[in-house]
Amino acid sequence: MTSRVLVCRCEDVTLDEVEEALAGGATDLESLKRYTGFGTGWCQGKQCVVACARLLEARTGAAPPAPITPRPPLHPVPLGLLAGLPDPEEAP
Amino acid sequence: MKKRVVVVGAGIMGLSTAFHLAKRGCTDVLVVDRGYLCGGASGRNGGGVRAQFSTETNIRLMQESIAICRDFAAAMKINVWFRQGGYLFLARTPERARDLEASCALQTRCGLPTRLLEPSEARGIVPELDPSGVLLASFNPEDGVLFPWPFLWGYARAARDLGVELATFQEVVGFEREGGRVTAVRLCRTTPGEAPERTREESLVRCDEVVLCTGAWSPEVARLAGVSLPNHPHRHEICSTEPLKPWLGPLVADLTDGLYFSQSMRGEIVGGISVEPVPDGIDQRSSRQFLARYARSLVRAVPRLAGVKVLRQWAGCYDLTPDANPIVGRVDDPENLTLACGFMGHGFMMGPVFGRLLAEHVLTGERSALFQRWSLERYRTGELLTETMIIG
């Protein structure tokens, strides 16, 4: 039944896919992210990074990994709002 | 340990080279990388693949690279999300419009279906585009976009299947030399994470040939072998939005302010813009200034995108040379060191074809006309090259 367990709900990454990546030699969290795509969707890993880190720790026996590098913005922001930010390089 | 060839850098350039070496029977190859796969520019670029360049060499090479990308999924049994929606270049100044006219004429002579478009015709390709201020556009329907990460997995798996050894988290910390040759590469294990740190675990790999495919890190790695390069790293930022239903055919690139954007097969709008000045050296941090500038230019080009949300931004480094062309091939001293660097932000799209060229060059030692053109020597002799179709 694991094929229907979602680890990353934004990008539809299943437990099977994470296990396959780990069995295939992913030994660190950044590689696991890039191979499965977990953490690259709407929540940017806020919901799935802990589950993936725990699976990595359990399967490799390594020390608990540091989280993946967080990517700004913290929450999704509309382009129209960003377009109104001041640009320090341009004269007012 | 002894290897016939050590390839430094497991980005697309290094992996493609290793794959082609092995395909030609040279399987005694070790590829090392100081970090994880996709950690450098090969994992950070926008995935654009185009033949719209301003020199015949680049046009012809990219025709071959596009063909490789088109066949890659079937040949390597991996989905790379390749989509040929074309590249739409926009010019907003008379000077840029003249550049487009000249490069389009050359591309036509090379057999590309590139055509020049009036601003109103550009709207026929991207109806959501606001063409005000655009003087001229060019469009090649054969250009495309892909998802970079699986290309690396594909090359890595195929190379390993042929016998190539791939060692990530191994940083080159020195080269052993005897006379005019490198005899061994000194490696140090690094820690996982985005900024790998050296451990105390060192090892020595003896070798006959070394190929440097180290992108923006090339000047510092080459220096370890006593080679001084004129390249420098240049940070470029990029971001990605929430996924949308497919609506955008081509990658749109504005040669005036360096804006580019496309829609990936996952539906996100992926794009960037030039920001100057950037911090010196290797810098992969993100800035809010970039987001503001990108958003302003993108919303001007496609006003309907104002309500679409940015999910993530990141950065990578271009590897820039003084004459906007790469430095490729053997150097004179040490004689068994081959460079493949200075790709000006086009290294990913050129990796598939350069892997083949580099493998042939390393195995035969022959310097074709292409490799003479791209030699490091040209900066001493002053025979510099040109290329005007650089985004960002």
Image: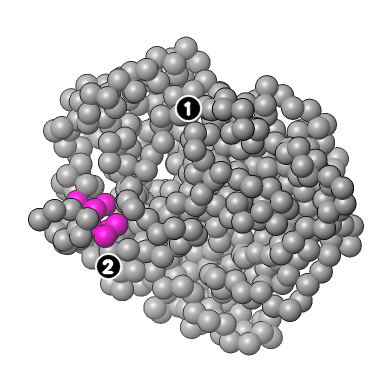
Q: Is B135 or B223 nearer to us in this picture? A: B223
**Residue B308 position within the rendered picture, expressed as x and y whole percent measured from the top left:** 22, 57
Chain of the residue where label 2 is placed in the rendered structure: A
Where residue B149 appears, as percent x and y from the top left, is: 55, 54
Q: Is residue B161 left or right of residue B279?
A: right
Q: Which residue position is annotated with label 2?
A: A76
Residue B380: in sight, yes or no?
yes
Q: Residue at x 76, y 65 (%)?
A: B187
Q: Quadrant of residue B195?
A: bottom right
Badge 2 vs badge 1, beta-carbon distance below 8 Å: no
User: Magenta residues, as a range?
Assistant: B289-296
| Residue at (67, 39) in percent of width and height | B355
Residue B188 location (% of width, % of height)? 73, 70
Q: Tell me the chief SS of the magenta region.
A: helix
Q: Which residue is mark 1?
A: B386
Chain ID, mark 1 = B
Within the magenta stretch, is there residue B34?
Answer: no
Q: Give left or right: position of B10 versus B1.
A: left
- Secondary element under disc 2, as helix, strand or loop, is loop
Name the residue type under label 1: Thr
Amino acid type, callout 2: Pro
Q: Quadrant of residue B135?
A: top left
* Crowding near the residue tagged with mark 1, few <14, some 14–19, many ≥20 C-alpha atoms within 10 Å: few
Classify mark 1: helix, strand or loop: loop
User: Does the magenta run of residues contain B292?
Assistant: yes
Q: Which quarter of the image is occupied by the N terminus of chain B?
A: bottom right
Q: In the figure, B249 relative to A55: above or below? A: above
Residue B128's disc is none
Q: CA distance from mark 2 to mark 1?
A: 40 Å
| Residue name at image x 61 percent, y 74 percent | B197
Residue nearer the viewer, B141 or B258: B258
Q: Outermost residue toward the left?
A: A92
